[in-house]
Image (spheres, rainbow, N blue to C red):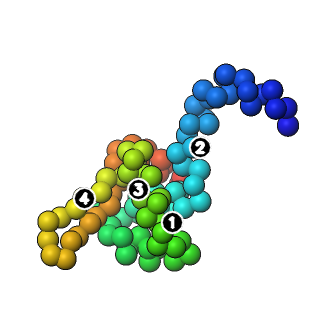
Amino acid sequence: MNKDFIKDPFFLECPIRNVLARIGGKWTLAVIYTLGGSETPLRFKDIERANPDCSQKMLTQTLRGLEADGLICRTVYPEMPPRVEYALTERGRSFLPVMR
């Protein structure tokens, strides 16, 4: 691989590079697909059951990253015990047609 290409300023600002940085995680697309297949928001355990090979730690990191990128929204309900639900945002839903 030509290392000069990587130092090229056009490569550093490449839009595809930005997209892959957001969705390139091992579990990112699986979580987006899981949330996209549900009509209602899902709780953490529902997402975990749908992706049994993903550890709790990795799922938490993936959900936090997706929330930070604006692809999912996290809703916390003031109940005891606390209830947290996850759903795709419009931006997150825009990935679904490409994935199917």
User: Of circles 3 and 2, which is in front?
Assistant: 3
Neighbours of disc 4 within 10 Å: few (<14), some (14-19), many (20+): few
- Residue of label 4: 75
Q: Quadrant of the N terminus?
A: top right
Helix, strand or loop under label 1: helix
Q: Do the CB atoms of the residues marked 1 and 4 lie less than 8 Å apart?
A: no
Answer with mark 1 or mark 4, whichever residue precedes in sequence. 1
Residue denoted by label 2: 20
Which residue type carries mark 3?
A: Arg
Q: Looking at the picture, which amino acid does disc 1 mark? A: Met
Q: How far across and down, in percent of the image, does residue 96 sit? A: 47, 51
Categorize mark 1 by other alpha carbons within 10 Å: few (<14), some (14-19), many (20+).
some
**CA separation in Å, label 2 and label 4:** 26 Å
Which residue matches tag 1? 58
Q: Quadrant of residue 77?
A: bottom left
Viewer-closest of 36 and 23: 23
Q: Which residue is mark 3?
A: 64
